[in-house]
Image: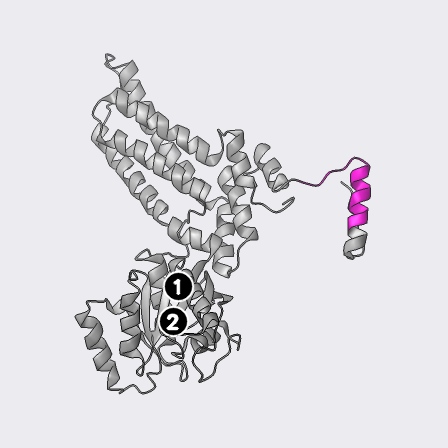
Amino acid sequence: MVEFQVHGNTIILNRILSLLISKGARIAEPGEFTKRAFLNGKIDLVQAESVANLIHSTTNFATKKSLENLSGGFSKKIFEWKKIITKFLAEVEANLDFYDKDDLPIFDLPENKKILEEVLEEIEKTISTYKIGKILEQGAKVVLAGLPNSGKSSLFNFFVGKEKAIVTNIPGTTRDTIESKIDLFGLPIILVDTAGINENSSDPIENFGIAKSKEEISFSDVVLWVLDQENFLDSMKIFETLKLSIKNFIFVINKIDNEDFSFKKDVEKFFEEKKFSKNSISLISVKFQKNIEDLKRKIYEKLIGEDKISEESIIVSTERQKEKLFEIFSSLNLAKKEKNLELIAENLKIALDEISELLGEKFKPDILDSVFHNFCIGK
């Protein structure tokens, strides 16, 4: 190995690289060092995938989870499942091969299936973590939308921690989308402030901004529909004309500056009649920083659902891992339901093959290409 310590000037670096390549060296391929570590048996494929996740981590929690997978936390659990399945298969095959022997140990099929049921529950729970794993890898898009001058940009600036969006009393100040990345309880969030949606605008530039707002809503994970006392009914009318699904919406009623504000009861009654869940409503004051933490918690819950992610949780971080786990689960579930020992054995073998592919003990070249093509050069 030869290391060059040179000046960081881009032109100098490129000339040195060109000279080295002319002498027979080549640029490392994406993920080449991690790929070599995998091919040489230093790490398994699950650990290799965690390297890419670690590189792209943007929050402390995401980094921590990637490091846990890299150190073998997830792989250890997979090997535990493999050991249990292998033991079950060995007992099934022993009974198939030596069923007529008197000294064969007693084979308790119901007990083995009970243990298998516990493995299935663990795998199912692990698969469910892909929702948060995907967010940790790619980030979640949270869009602020609503009528002009409802407080979207003020809320955006508060989340971001600086005056990034222009805030005035003049409606329609925001004409384009503004993005910023924030950390929400460990989740990487792409926060998007959009132009106010005004259905009666005759300004072509404002209408273009409104069209972009609607597009952002359609690609969002969660939408904060911001409204206040003055525009409450008009805002809800426009919301209903847009025929939007309310599944991922939180109605953020801003400018509730007084805890005894009489409007609060009217709002709660309105949403109760509409049969909206309380989790979809948040009454806040950006100006006086009231109930902002409650709003953050509701955004978090909208993103991860009812899944409770603890510090010790194993998290599935790639689509490949999720698909393989689902295939393992399906084979084991068939084995659990079967009564015929030969069919049980066959499904257990399939599950073990899928585990081998998950860990990279068996792999196809195109799988490796798929895993490593998103890596940075080298790594």
Hey, what amino acid is under mark 2?
Answer: Ile
User: Is residue 271 shown above or below 128?
Assistant: below
Image quadrant occupied by the N terminus: top right
Q: Which residues are magenta?
A: 14-28
Badge number at residue 197: 2
Per the image, is 285 magenta? no
Residue 239: x and y in percent read 30, 68
| Residue at the image position 34 percent from the left and 48 percent from the top | 128
Q: Which sits in the foreground, 85 or 263?
A: 263
In the displayed structure image, the side of residue 275 where residue 43 appears, left or right: right
Total count of labels: 2
Q: CA distance from mark 2 to mark 1?
A: 8 Å
Q: For mark 1, does the 10 Å Cα neighbourhood hold few (<14), some (14 to 19), or many (20 or more) residues? A: some
Report if residue 280 is visible in the image: no
In the displayed structure image, the side of residue 170 where residue 122 appears, left or right: left
Q: Are marks 2 and 1 in contact (CB under 8 Å)?
A: yes
Q: Quadrant of residue 202?
A: bottom left
| Residue at the image position 60 percent from the left and 41 percent from the top | 34
Q: For mark 2, does the 10 Å Cα neighbourhood hold few (<14), some (14 to 19), or many (20 or more) residues? A: many
Query: Under tag 2, what secondary structure?
Result: loop
Image quadrant occupied by the C terminus: top right
| Residue at the image position 51 percent from the left and 43 percent from the top | 49
Q: Badge 1 is on which residue?
A: 214
Residue at the limit of the structure toward the left, as seen here: 273
Badge number at residue 43: none
Q: Quadrant of residue 260?
A: bottom left
Dot 2 or dot 1, earlier in sequence: 2
Residue 113: x and y in percent read 25, 33
